[in-house]
Amino acid sequence: MNRCVSSAILPLVILGTASGLFGCEKSEIQSYRAPREFRGTPETAATLKPADHEHIVDWNIPDDWTELETTSSMRIATFQANNTQEIAVTAFPGDVGGLIANVNRWREQVGVEAITETQIEDSIERVAGSTVIIVDIQGETNRLLGSIINIGDGQTWFAKATGPDEMIGNIKDDLVAFSVSFRPHDHSAHANEDSQHNHADHAAPEISTDWELPSEWTPEQDFSNMLLAAFTTDSGGRVTMSELVGDGGGVIGNVNRWRNQLGLPIVATEAELGLEKMGQGSVIVDILSPNDEDRMMAAIVPIGSRTLFFKLTGKTSAVEAEMERFRTCVQMVGVANEVLP
Amino acid sequence: MMIKKYLKPIASLKLTVVIFALSFFLIFAGTLAQVHAGIWTVVDQYFRSLVVTIDLQIFVPQDVLRVPGAFWFPGGLTLGTAMLINLIAAHTIRFKFTKKRIGIILTHLGVILLLVGEFVTGFAAKEGNMTIREGETVNFVEDIRASELAIIDQSDPEDDLIVVVPDRLLESEGTVLDSKNELPFTVEVVEWMTNSQIFGPNQAPDGRRGLADSGSASQLIAVPLPVANGVDGSVVDAPSAYIAISSEGERIGTYLLSVYLEGPQAVVVGDRTYWLNLRFARTYKPYSMRLIDFKHDLFTGTRMARNYSSQVQLVDEGRNVDREVLIYMNHPLRHAGETFYQASFLKGDTGTVLQVVKNPGWLIPYVSCVVITLGMLIHFGWRMAPKPRRKVS
């Protein structure tokens, strides 16, 4: 018995010493002096991290939108569409309560009753592989159009507009396109650019412009600075060329966005997009609206670390008249930049 | 002889088996506990404690059955110590040095070293982060597992007076600082959230309203979250708190403080302005680092990271050091007994996050692994080596 007791003493001594050492943690109120870290005034406001969205995301601003000065500390950006309708962009950490909570919050804001988890899919529209969720709620007096955007940065981004039914209807396509264009900021590729929003540089040296302009196309003088070039065709159509860093959101994301603009449903796989492959990753697609009135032919041509986007849009007849010239133009630019055979 | 007599019971092989069995169970229970508790909470409660209270609920999913009750179990510190003593005792009373036993002795020596290494790490290792924006100079390390309320008085033209309340004292509601301290006001915790999420006005679930009526974050709402457990993707707790400030019995305001907020909030008491900030716990260092440049290189034509690197100016006047250092992946800086690893970066590549580790026992696991490997190679090599044939007469 004595032997057992003695044998137990050694471990207990070691354990006692060990636990005593573990207990030495800093846990009291302390005061000290330190060099000045910031110089504050009472007006200095604590803001949600991160305050500087330009270093976090890139987005494409629709042609008809202008950015307004944002005065609210909770807003990331504010836009105005057609000089009237305001669109607010916010971001909050985490999932901000989850999808159902956000949708019901918006429904409550326009006086519409809440929905349950089982009804959620009927009330939303998922685009760009579910990274963007569009919520369109018609209230008693106002209509709310919002998008919930996840770009994988640990935050949930929101773009929202509330207003009369017709006004919201007019900006819906642009708000969807704007939301789909959200992507993590490509810092390395744009380190020296002043504006991180504008991915098209009119003098981008990487893109060779050694191609022949069809005589039926008239260069536009006053086009969005997001575009490399824009042309009006004699048939009444419009051709635009733009450039984005990386894959610019990918083929499926972009074509789905265009399908959405023409009122076609979003598809889940590339095989359903009806793509025509041009070689070396380049594709061309022909999209017709459900009522056959509008048409779009678009091409995606990767060039090194960037991607060129060509779009021919307009009434069906106007687009059909230019389709061959458009193909030729895409081919010529691709050959000039040594990415198409 | 006398020592051997006393050591014999604690050198028992049966005891070894029991300790192993208990250790297996502890590891199993500790793994299950991480479903609901944070990884560092579990490490402290299960593996660096003498005794752990194991809830029965961890063995049954909560949505299947609610199981009340708990039982006591020896913690990792107890079992590790017991294992070390058992091993040393066994070698003490059975020690025989022969050529055949070199492998076994080396292997066990390696195991002893490994156990000692964990003791040293548990007792002495310190870990933190140094977050530096480009162009900024930082002289402190933040512990992302702990937070503190900092109240900053800038009335001195030279330095700031900083009063720091550690999170342990903020966890319970009530007054944590009264005006008898260096500050002419009382600080009261209205609500503490170990982990939280921030919502905008009207965004919070269940119609929850914010408690703050003052400060630049009064429109925001903090909602408590379960502690980060590392299992569901959450790794770091983000604490928030509603803190009320009163002076001479009069409430000045209730403020929302959170590690999610950038910058401190002003409180005006009398003719002085004080600054409130809930931040990760800081340890100030005798050296400083200025981030000259952070680089996030990509493989050409892709968004795949090829390298992260931080070019810093290290200044330590006490050690007569003022030099430029490049810290990058697998190339840490070692200075003043600490190691600085390139750990992460700020969103938009605007700054770097260096992991600062001080672990006097960092080399022990490497040495012990080498010794164990060597011991096993010798032991099995000896046994498997072809034996010379006996001559048949």
Image (cartoon, coloured by chain):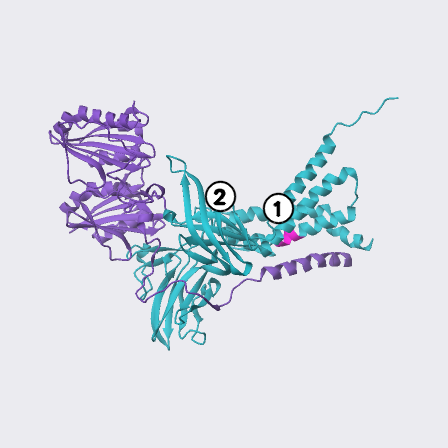
Chain colours: A purple, B cyan
Q: Are marks 1 and 2 on the same chain?
A: yes
Foreground mark, 1 or 2, reads 2
Provide the residue designation for mark 2.
B329
Q: Between A216 and A29, which is closer to the camera in this rendering? A: A216
Q: Between A60 and B326, which is closer to the camera in this rendering? A: B326
Q: Residues within 10 Å of mark 2 (few under 14, many from 20)?
A: few
Q: Position of residue B81 (x, y in %)?
A: 66, 53
Per the image, label 2 sits on a secondary structure element best described as loop
What is the chain identity of the residue bearing mark 2? B
Q: Residues within 10 Å of mark 1 (few under 14, many from 20)?
A: some
Say whether residue B296 is visible. Answer: yes
Q: At 37% from the left edge and 34% from the top edge, which residue is drawn?
A: B301
Provide the residue designation for mark 1.
B365
Per the image, label 1 sits on a secondary structure element best described as helix
**Alpha-carbon span between mark 1 and mark 2:** 21 Å
Q: Amino acid at mark 1?
A: Pro
* Left or right, residue B65 beside residue B265: right
Q: Which residues fall within the magenta stretch?
A: B77-81
Q: Position of residue A10 (x, y in %)?
A: 71, 58
Q: At 67% from the left edge and 58% from the top edge, which residue is drawn?
A: A14
Say whether residue B55 is visible. Answer: no
* Circles 1 and 2: CB atoms closer than 8 Å: no
Taking A316 as reference, is B109 above or below it? below
Report the quarter where the C terminus of chain B lies: top right
Majority SS type along the magenta span: helix
Q: At 79% from the left edge and 43% from the top edge, which residue is drawn?
A: B97
Of the numbered discs 1 and 2, the one sitting upstream in the chain is 2
Q: Position of residue B335 (x, y in %)?
A: 54, 53
What is the chain identity of the residue bearing mark 1? B
- Quarter holding residue A75: bottom left
Q: Between A212 and B90, which is closer to the camera in this rendering? A: A212
Q: Amino acid at mark 2?
A: Met
